[in-house]
């Protein structure tokens, strides 16, 4: 079975990826973590990805759904939508190595939000399922995902995921936001944030209302396998070159 981790930015996903890569093995793992690799994913046939038992990254469900194996199941982690947006802005504003840093550091929070309203509207629903409506997103998650949890209850998510793959899991936080941007919240911006995150908050609340904050879908049990053998000349061949990008 192939495990696909749809990594929503700023949800403790990098730490989870590192933990799962140790479980599945580097040769069985593919991480889509920059624009070049995302283009590679979108433009390549499914056969290019069949050898990987674990795939993760900042891609949308619609990017990967037709590329993964028929036995693929999905996992993801959600975060309070407004807290996630604030964390993402602060991260890009304060992290000099981020590819968007130079642009974002010139923006206040209101500039950032009002300039990207379409991007933020239903962002988590869309990334996990391709739909911006929470009701539709829930149906896709129920059918295709093994597990969706919350960053605020990561311990429960790790415990359940560990049971699914027969491996105890633990992780710390990495890629932590180092500082804060220019936060200029006012009534207009608060109303806009609430409007843009309406569907994401409905999805978040649906997961938060479940036992242990875990949405356990209909996907089957995940079974890691030993890393497959590859020729030495393939071992260090990059899929694509590019600048690391989080959002």
Image: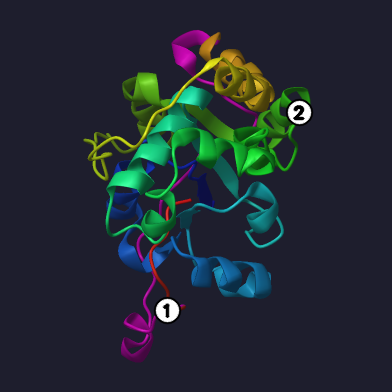
Residue 141 placement (x, y as % from top left): 66, 32
Real-space Cα separation, disc 2 to disc 1, in angstroms: 35 Å
Q: Is residue 15 above or below residue 37?
A: above
In the image, is residue 26 above or below residue 48? above
Res 241 label: 1
Magenta: main secondary structure equals loop
Report if residue 212 lies within the magenta region. Answer: yes
Q: Residue at x 37, y 55 (%)?
A: 101
Q: Is residue 181 visible?
A: yes
**Residue 155 forms part of the magenta stretch:** no
| SS of the residue under disc 1 | loop
Number of numbered discs overlaid on the protein picture = 2
Quarter-of-image position of residue 138: top right
The residue at the far bottom in this view is 233
Query: Residue at 56% of width from left, 18% of height from top?
Result: 190
User: Label 1 crowding class (10 Å Cα cut-off): few <14, some 14-19, many 20+?
Assistant: few
Q: Which residue is mark 2?
A: 133
Query: How far across and how far down the image is residue 109, in percent?
Result: 46, 35
**Which of marks 1 and 2 precedes in the sequence?**
2
Foreground: 28 or 124? 124
Q: Is residue 218 left or right of residue 53?
A: right
Residue 121 on image: x %, y %: 67, 34
Q: Is residue 10 visible?
A: no
Secondary structure under tag 2 reads loop
Query: What is the number of the mark on residue 68?
Result: none
Q: Residues within 10 Å of mark 2 (few under 14, many from 20)?
A: some
Residue 24, horizontal then vertical, whole percent:
35, 55
Residue 193 appears in which quarter of the rendering?
Answer: top right
Labels 2 and 1 touching (C-beta < 8 A) = no
Seen at 40% across and 50% down, the residue is: 106
Instruction: Find the magenta span and give its range.
Output: 210-239
Quadrant housing residue 187: top right
């Amino acid at each position: 079975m192939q495990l696909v981790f749809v990594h929503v930015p700023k949800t403790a996903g990098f730490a989870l990826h590192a933990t799962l890569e140790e479980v599945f093995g580097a040769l069985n793992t593919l991480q889509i973590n920059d624009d070049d690799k995302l283009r590679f994913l979108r433009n390549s046939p499914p056969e290019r990805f069949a050898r990987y038992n674990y795939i993760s990254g900042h891609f949308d469900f619609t990017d990967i759904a037709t590329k993964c194996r028929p036995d693929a199941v999905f996992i993801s982690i959600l975060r309070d939508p407004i807290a996630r947006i604030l964390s993402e802005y602060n991260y890009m504003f304060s992290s000099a190595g981020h590819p968007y840093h130079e642009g974002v550091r010139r923006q206040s929070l209101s500039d950032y939000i009002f300039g990207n309203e379409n991007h933020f509207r239903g962002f988590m629903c869309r990334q996990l399922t391709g739909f911006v409506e929470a009701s539709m997103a829930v149906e896709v998650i129920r059918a295709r995902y093994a597990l969706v949890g919350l960053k605020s209850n990561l311990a429960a998510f790790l415990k359940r995921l560990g049971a699914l793959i027969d491996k105890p899991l633990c992780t710390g936080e990495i890629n932590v936001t180092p500082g804060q941007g220019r936060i200029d919240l006012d009534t207009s911006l608060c109303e806009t944030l609430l409007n843009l995150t309406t569907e994401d908050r409905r999805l978040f609340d649906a997961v938060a209302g479940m036992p242990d904050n875990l949405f356990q879908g209909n996907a089957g049990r995940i079974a890691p396998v030993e890393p497959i053998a590859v020729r030495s000349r393939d071992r260090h061949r990059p899929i694509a070159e590019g600048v690391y990008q989080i959002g």
